[in-house]
Image (cartoon, grey):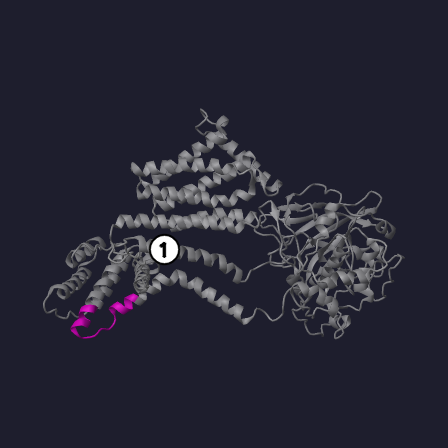
Amino acid sequence: MSGRARLALTAAAATLMASCSLLPLVSPTTWLFQAAFLVAIQTGVGAAARRVPLARPLTVAAQALVTLLMLTLVFARGHAIAGLIPGPDTFRYFADLLQQGSDDVSRYAIPAPLSDGIRLMVIGGVLIVGLIVDTLAVTFRSAAPAGLPLLALYSVAAGLSDGPTDWLWFLVAAAGYLLLLLAEGRDRLSQWGRVFGGVSRTPGGPESGAVAPVRTGRRIGFAVLSVALFVPFVMPSIEGGLLDGTGNGVGVGNGNGGTISAVNPLVSLRDSLNVDEDRQVLSVRTSTADISDLYLRIVSLDDFDGTTWKPAQRHITGVPDTFPTPVGLGGDVKRAPVRTTISAADWYAQDWLPMPYPPSGVKIAGSWRYEPVGMTLVGDHGQNTRGETYQVTSLDVQPTADQLAAAPEPSAAMKKDYTKVPSSLPSVVAQTAREVTAGATSHYEEAVKLQDYFAVNGGFQYDTQVQVGRGEGAIANFLKEKRGFCVHFSFAMAAMARTLGIPARVAVGFAPGTPQADGTVSVGLKDAHAWPELYFEGVGWTRFEPTPTRGTTPSYTVSDTPGSSAPDEALPSKGASAAPSASASASESCSAQLRKQDVCASPSAAGVVQQGDGGPPWWQLALWALAGLAVLAVPLSPMLYRQRVRADRLGAYDRTPDGVAAHTLAVWQELIDTAWDFGIPPDDSQSPRGAAARIVLLGRLDPVSAASVHRVADAVEQVLYAPRPRLTAGLSDDVRRVTAAFNGAVSVHTRLRALFAPRSAVRALWAAAGWWARLRERAAATRPTLRKPSEQQS
């Protein structure tokens, strides 16, 4: 089998290996066998076209035509001419299938069923990537850029999937790319012939030829792969926040997929509370007369890992005309419809849509998707809230204390998903929850006791300048220090409720804003808030307010319930005021009135549950700096190596006969390598004079530069053959003159490649391989030889 054929097979294998990253997305995985068969046919057509040989564009065209015919035969046989030749109806059918596949991707969670539309998208995508890889790596003999379509194929799968085995698919795809690079290297070396001699594997044995550099290249490839896996663990991550005004938002990617996941909102929530200027985020006009319960919810955090709360990955669908009844809401609970019009500021670009909970319908322009579990909307294809005006119909659910107290035990599925706490959670959290709720006869009474413990009688203070530690002990530290802001209160109450068997999650959004003279409500950055939601069967997810001096206490938690305590007069409650406090902190050092007059110092950016305040440690910064230097040094290393070698070869030398001879041979070697960098490979079988003539001919050098080449060749012949070599001055200038001539005669692409990816830099790998072989030989030579004792003669 020829080298070109082996390279084509390797390109096909690399495409299929990268395609394995799509396996977790679709079930069943039988599509991969069909894709492998079609890729094999595509590769065979390319190999046949190159063997004819056809011109490169005709080879690509032949492969593309056969690919289209195969897709027509497999997917649109009934819509083609004679079952094979595509016509207008065929392309219309392809468009319908692709639209169906797009809808299926949005409709189904991962893994999606293998519908005809999804099968066309997956197999067609693999064939297109396979064609591009074969074209770049085999037809145009450039395997390195072929990694881009392979990376694109893997990135699509990685952007949609978030499974624990994603690293395995990365390794498979990367291994395929490394195999492609090695195959191309072997093919190039086989074309050059024996252009260099490697060190023999055994003393006195034959030369190893291309084995040493290939083996070294393989080691370098594995080293680069290891660095690619290690660097993401030490490099800092970049994440957006739920309340960011920059459009980073919550979603991973651009929202095109069928699932969503979100990042931790703590940093942006804290920053929103600590701003010096309370900028208006939303302008709200509502039909309800009492705005004290008008919380605008962005998203719920239901995944608790012991350190923080975050949104779980969720399936998204199209926005329904009418939202379903909230989970758990029974027919005997009083409710009233509320109509709300919300206008977002031009600078506020949020991926998620702030809405009253629970919504029953939304009217909004643009591309939005619906997440059914949290009953939230998320932007699709880069859609966000910037400057948007939308209408939300929601329910004002008004349960009574008796209804909540009489709620039956939640279902097993609800308790399984929403009462989980990690084993690493400090035992003091559950112990404190039991002590606080002692004597309660229902989950409702326990919830009220927890709320009052934080907001009324537990001695807690609202403060954004706290330092409560990090990691799994953060909640325990907060319970000890009793200072924090809404994130700490909501996180702690939700965690403690889960230890009592109450399903709980945390909601993030905005507390009720400030009424304006025109009848609207202004919601500012300092109204950013987090609060716990507890689930009661027959009522559904129910808001509680444990944060003192923030938001409003729900009316159903201040009734005459046995065991509950009366709220403090300083704590806002429903009906007490329609204008919640806009102050971000009510610490002892700065009252709300002074803060409103702008005479307080701005709070520091402290107080995040899981983060410290001093920034990364110095050693981590040093690692980042070293990693950054390594990222820059690796692609520039061939250029730096060649510049150093060139300077040594053309530099000063001893004026002794040995020094002159060494300098002349070094200059000649630099001339050979310079020509190699510009596309003229060396030919060791020729004499210096023949090599010089070959360089002048292939390099199309002008007469002056040609004379410089021959002058260097004459000096080499003097050193090699003359009994008394004479000194030839100006050889270094001759090489520099030839280099300048090459730069002026070649294209920009060739000039840049000679600078940044010089071919002669491979000598560094050969030298390293030879050094390693010699080291092994010396080690083998110095190793003591153990002789088997001869048998005793009888």
Left or right of residue 546: residue 299? left
- Is 428 above or below relative to 84? below
Toward the viewer: 627 or 734? Answer: 627
Q: Position of residue 577 (x, y in %)?
A: 83, 61
Chief SS of the magenta region: helix
| Residue farthest to the top, as pictured | 82
Residue 489 visible from this viewpoint: no
Q: Nearer the viewer, residue 467 or 510?
A: 467
Residue 623 image point, x, y percent: 50, 67
Instruction: Name which residue type carries label 1.
Output: Gly
Q: Which residues are magenta?
A: 645-662
- Name the residue: 25% across, 50% down: 193
Q: Position of residue 589 (x, y in %)?
A: 74, 75
| Quarter the N terminus occupies | top left
Whether 378 is among the magenta residues is no
| Element type where label 1 sits in the image | helix
Left or right: 683, with 581 as reference point: left
How many numbered tags mark residues here? 1
Give residue 578's quadrant in the image.
bottom right
Q: Locate the C terminus by quadrant.
A: bottom left
Residue picked out by circle 1: 217
Q: Image point 54% across, 71% down: which residue?
A: 618
